[in-house]
Image (tube, grey):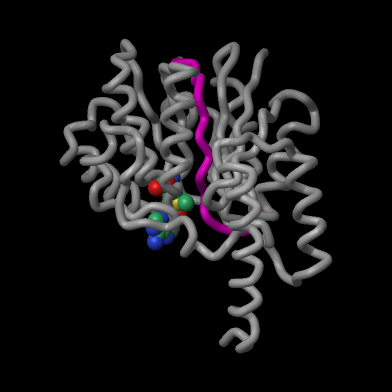
């Protein structure tokens, strides 16, 4: 269906408002959930539609990484960022968080540029037996990521597994399947950027790892400024099992939180 002719202009106007807001606030600042929800509520008084907190991607997409992490500049030299993948600033924030948390076992939902980032960080940090276990709904994307890891000499630090999604675009796992993936290695960092599908389809990702999580750890959720992911954040943090540190207003949003058993 073609979009009404006035809609792109409205989107540009909304994007300009969001861009000014982000510039004033700073993309490196963690925003509390209630602040984010208040801004969305205000935007709803002016605009119609979904995902009003997500600007047009022209403000955050790029053809390669040219940020402040030297180890990634060559690795991500021809990797598009900020469309399907995390944006430049998001990559830097993930790297900073890895430096702070120093995880040994990273579980990622949705492979791609981020898998390269996790593998490169594990190599850089020299964590003994450090590994990223990445789960992808698409056999083709999983295979592409494996090839990229291989050509970068990073295969020892990450493995990519194809796991299909069900009719509701949720990962179709069972306990023995998960047990086989993690082989008794407690997960201390979870990055959720998949599956791609129906709104809210990422809800089951972090809770399904419950039995495999370390005593404490860090979780991150990409696309956190979309309506579906904001609901996911609220559901995860509702029972205080998982805590939210805040949301970075960069790209499509990056939420970060932690757990402590
Ligand atoms: C948001 S993407 C994951 C991106 C990854 N975390 C990154 O930052 O590069 C989530 C899933 O969408 C699927 N997908 C479907 N179409 C895609 C496309 N054109 N490019 C990349 N991923 C795509 C892939 O299976 C992927 O696992």
Q: Is residue 150 above or below residue 121?
A: below
Residue 60: x %, y % from top left? 47, 56
Which residue is pictured at 73% across the width and 23% down the height?
241
Residue 244: give x, y in percent of width and height: 69, 30
Of 232 and 133, the residue lying toward us: 232
* Residue 3 magenta-highlighted: no
Q: Which segment is the magenta one?
A: 185-201
Residue at 61% over, 65% down? 16
- Which of the 4 quarters of the picture holds residue 49? bottom right
Describe residue 144's horizontal placement relative to residue 110 as left or right: left
Picture coordinates of residue 178, whole percent (x, y): 49, 29
Q: Quadrant of the C terminus?
A: top right
- In this view, 97 is above or below 57: above
213 with respect to 86 (left or right): right
Q: Is residue 191 visible?
A: yes
Q: Name which quarter of the figure residue 45 lies in.
A: bottom right
Please identify the residue farthest to the front as the structure is shown.
24
Question: Within the image, what quadrant is residue 259 found in?
Answer: top right
The residue under the point 61% across, 88% down is 5
């Amino acid at each position: 269906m073609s979009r009404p002719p006035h809609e792109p202009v409205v989107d540009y106007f909304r994007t300009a408002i969001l861009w000014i807001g982000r510039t004033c606030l700073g993309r490196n600042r963690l925003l509390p959930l209630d602040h984010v929800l208040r801004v969305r509520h205000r935007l709803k008084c002016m605009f119609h539609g979904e995902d009003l907190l997500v600007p047009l991607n022209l403000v955050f997409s790029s053809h390669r990484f040219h940020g402040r992490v030297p180890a990634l500049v060559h690795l991500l030299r021809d990797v598009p960022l900020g469309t399907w993948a995390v944006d430049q600033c998001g990559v830097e924030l993930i790297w900073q968080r890895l430096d702070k948390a120093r995880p040994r076992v990273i579980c990622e939902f949705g492979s791609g540029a981020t898998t390269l980032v996790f593998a490169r960080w594990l190599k850089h940090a020299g964590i003994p037996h450090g590994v990223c276990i990445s789960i992808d709904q698409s056999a083709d994307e999983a295979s592409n990521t494996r090839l990229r890891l291989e050509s970068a000499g990073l295969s020892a630090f990450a493995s990519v597994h194809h796991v299909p999604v069900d009719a509701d675009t949720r990962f179709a796992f069972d306990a023995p399947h998960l047990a086989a993936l993690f082989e008794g290695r407690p997960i201390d960092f979870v990055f959720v950027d998949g599956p791609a599908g129906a709104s809210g389809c990422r809800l089951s990702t972090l809770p399904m790892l419950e039995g495999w999580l370390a005593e404490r750890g860090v979780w991150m959720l990409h696309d956190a400024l979309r309506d579906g992911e904001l609901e996911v954040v609220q559901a995860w943090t509702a029972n205080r099992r998982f805590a939210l540190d805040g949301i970075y207003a960069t790209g499509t949003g990056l939420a970060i939180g932690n757990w402590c058993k």
